[in-house]
Amino acid sequence: MSTAHPGRDGQAAFATFRPRRGRAVSAVFAVLSVLLFGVIAVLLPGLGAGGQWRVGDRLFFAGVGLSIAALLWRYATIRATPTRDTLTIRNLFTTRTVSWQSVVDLRFGGGDPWVTIELDDTDTVAVMAVQKADGAFGRAEASRLAALIQALGPSATSPDVQPD
């Protein structure tokens, strides 16, 4: 049995958002990509074995495997990190920090694969760290993000409001 810690709920509310399923799948496929393309690069028949593959060709295959793995690794590191003042969103190709005061709406419905937030300047930002593919976990994380927006966003009654 664990004992309750003061401030534990606050720590849980500000925990980093990360996808589960997409992270696991991309990490596994990154390793498989390196292994597969590495094996191909080693086993290609060279000029001495009656083939036409040269060292440059082998390096190309190894480079393709590493490039695919790098892209998949980047996908595995997608996250959204909340603080009392901002939300830092690291998506596949961009990282953006937004103030809670500028977030006016959250959407997690329809055909969208992840959460999108609408900002007060009418811009929308994808939060790829909260994904529909994660099922109930994804819905719970979207609710936690919505609670943070409600507690810390422009509709918050006081800067001292604690999220639940």
Image: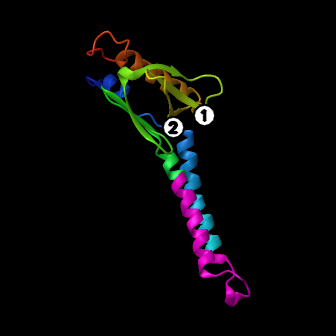
Where residue 9 appears, as percent x and y from the top left, is 33, 23
Q: How many marks?
A: 2
In-front residue for pair 53/6: 53
Image disc number at residue 133: 1
Q: Amino acid at mark 2?
A: Pro
* 133 vs 5: above or below: below
Q: What residue is drawn where x is 64% and y is 82%?
A: 54
- The relative height of residue 32 versus residue 2 in the rendered view (above or below) is below
Q: Which residue is mark 2?
A: 19
Q: Is residue 130 magenta?
A: no
Which one is in front, 162 or 61? 61
Residue 130 point in image, percent of width and height: 51, 32
Specify the quadrant of the image occupied by residue 42. Answer: bottom right
| Mark toward the start of the polypeptide (2 vs 1) | 2
Q: Is residue 53 left or right of residue 140?
A: right
Q: Describe residue 163's horizontal placement relative to residue 37 as left or right.
A: left
Q: Which mark is residue 123?
A: none
Q: Nearer the viewer, residue 132 or 95?
A: 95
Alpha-carbon distance for marks 2 and 1?
A: 9 Å
Q: Main secondary structure of the magenta part?
A: helix
